[in-house]
Image (cartoon, rainbow, N blue to C red):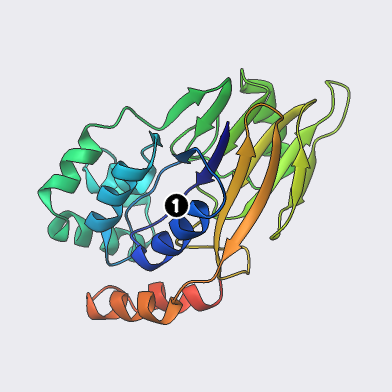
Amino acid sequence: MKVAVISDIHANRHALDAVLADIDESGIEEIWFLGDAVGYGAFPGECVLTLKDRCSVFLLGNHDLAALREIDIGTFSPSAAISARWTREHMDEDAFEVLRGLDGTSAEREGIGLFHASPRDPIWEYVVDSDLAEDNLDFQEQRVALIGHSHIALYFTRVDEMSRVSSVLAPEGTELEMSAGKWLLNPGSAGQPRDGDPRSAWAELDTESFQARFHRVQYPVEEAAEAIRKAGLPSHLGDRLFKGQ
């Protein structure tokens, strides 16, 4: 089965629309979403309802849990905390009902592990280096796992138990053959990229051949940033969309 893996929309409707249009042209059978539908952007409700309609997997992320008041936002950055409070006040009740009905921050499909943050800590851990990946590859039960949260398109792999973990950034067009070894794959962020490429990110995965390909998609960043400013959210949340940081 060919699936699209997306993560970290962060209420960026313009980016989500562009990614879904690209996915629709790629012969994808299912969409798996790794969490953080809301936070930072100006369209939380619209994104939640669209994801509900389009995704066969819909995980909760830490920003989704913050909107539901299920985690303490005291550890959030000031702008993230402002955004969480704004989302609580402005998102429609039907979108809250969708989030309340979700199962959690992790799942398994086709023998593949799906986690918002990491196999070891699905809510908070940022897997951004080989040491953290090593620990998580030891912890995860599945041979292949998908993660989000860091907003960076990258992958980690270990050929066998005696090998060191390789950590590699995954720019557009990166292709992987994952039929052997153990893997952690992050598709990057669709709505808030932080790997220096402002384009929306998603990954394509064949669950039978275990081949993967990383994609990037242009979207109207100016419109998304202007919507953030008009909503009264911190302006730098829109400004950073132009840089992918």
Task: Say left or right for 117 vs 153.
Answer: left
| x 30%, y 55%: residue | 47
Rendered location of residue 161, percent (x, y) = 83, 20
In the rendered image, which quarter is residue 227 located in?
A: bottom left
Task: Say left or right for 36 vs 198.
Answer: left
Quadrant showing the N terminus: top right
Secondary element type, mark 1: loop
Question: How many discs mark residues in the rendered view?
Answer: 1
Residue 245 seen anywhere in this rendered image of the structure: no
Task: Say left or right for 55 vs 230.
Answer: right
Q: Residue furthest right?
A: 162
- Callout 1 crowding tier (Cα within 10 Å): few <14, some 14–19, many ≥20: many
The three-letter code of the residue at mark 1 reads Asp
Rendered location of residue 238, percent (x, y) = 40, 76
Residue 15 seen anywhere in this rendered image of the structure: yes
Residue situated in front as seen by the camera: 210 or 121? 210
Quadrant showing the C terminus: bottom right
In the rendered image, which quarter is residue 18 located in?
A: bottom left
Give the answer, above or below, for where 218 lies relative to 216: below
Give the answer, above or below, for where 146 lies relative to 229: above
Rendered location of residue 156, percent (x, y) = 73, 40
| x 22%, y 55%: residue | 45
Residue occupied by mark 1: 8
Residue situated in front as seen by the camera: 42 or 79? 42
